[in-house]
Amino acid sequence: QQQVKQSPQSLIVQKGGIPIINCAYENTAFDYFPWYQQFPGKGPALLIAIRPDVSEKKEGRFTISFNKSAKQFSLHIMDSQPGDSATYFCAAQASGYALNFGKGTSLLVTP
Amino acid sequence: GAGVSQSPSNKVTEKGKDVELRCDPISGHTALYWYRQSLGQGLEFLIYFQGNSAPDKSGLPSDRFSAERTGGSVSTLTIQRTQQEDSAVYLCASSPAWGTDTQYFGPGTRLTVL
């Protein structure tokens, strides 16, 4: 069963737009929530991660918003660029266990 | 230093054959993970090694799948009697230690079973 549900499956935005990708989970034991970025032919690379003791984390143009009560978290990409076009995966992990990944969101940023 | 490397990058095999996929983790990383990425299915955990501890095999889909890690470094994932549904990209990742540390992924091996 999919422990992390990710939406949308695909997303198209214009350059400068703010794509938002959402994830939801059920397991309250999860305590680490990373986002990975994957380009074609490459392995996923960690983009940004958050723990449930904070509600928001920013790194450059990337922001994670975390809602512990709703068991949801989202990725926002500010001032998106064509180079941000990639597949984005959210994940969740309970300490001592493996990462559980969402199914991914294919993002296309048009010029 | 070098990142995680995997070989071969592509493997085409016939149904029923055995295949071996190799992973070289980042030097000094004690934790090593195998994942399978199927089209539209995200990344599926297969197996995890941490130091000299017994591996966590809870994600292996069947007894046709096995993995070993020699000398705490290189790992080999073996799939016996391959089936068409085994076709996927097999990703290896390593991290400095178990727990919620960053996992560094290799480029993957694309396996196609005809």
Image (cartoon, coloured by chain):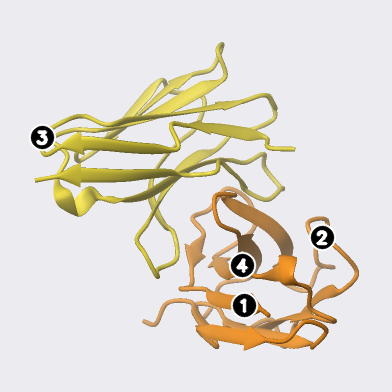
Locate the N terminus of chain A and report the quarter of the image it occupies. top right
The residue at the point 48 percent across, 77 percent down is B4
Label 4 sits on what residue type? Answer: Ala
Which residue is under mark 2? Answer: B61
Q: Earlier in the sequence, mark 2 or mark 4?
A: 2
Mark 1 and mark 4: Cα distance apart in space? 7 Å
Spatial CA distance of label 2 from label 4 is 13 Å
Image mark 3: chain: A
Q: Are marks 3 and 1 in contact (CB under 8 Å)?
A: no
The amino acid at mark 3 is: Gly
Q: Confirm whether circles 1 and 4 share one chain.
A: yes
Q: Residue at x 45, y 66 (%)?
A: A43
Q: Which residue is mark 3?
A: A16
| Secondary structure of the residue carrying numbered label 1 | strand
Asked whether the residues under the numbered discs 3 and 4 touch, taking CB atoms below 8 Å apart as contact, a structural biologist would say: no
State the hue of chain B: orange
- Chain letter for mark 2, please: B
* Residue underneath mark 1: B112
Determine which quarter of the picture holds residue A94.
top right
As helix, strand or loop, the secondary structure at mark 3 comes to loop
* N-term-proximal mark, 1 vs 4: 4
Between the C-alphas of marks 3 and 1, the distance is: 39 Å
Marks 3 and 4: which is nearer the front?
A: 4
Q: x%, y% of residue B24?
A: 56, 83
- Quarter residue B14 falls in: bottom right
Q: Is there one chain holding both mark 3 and mark 4?
A: no
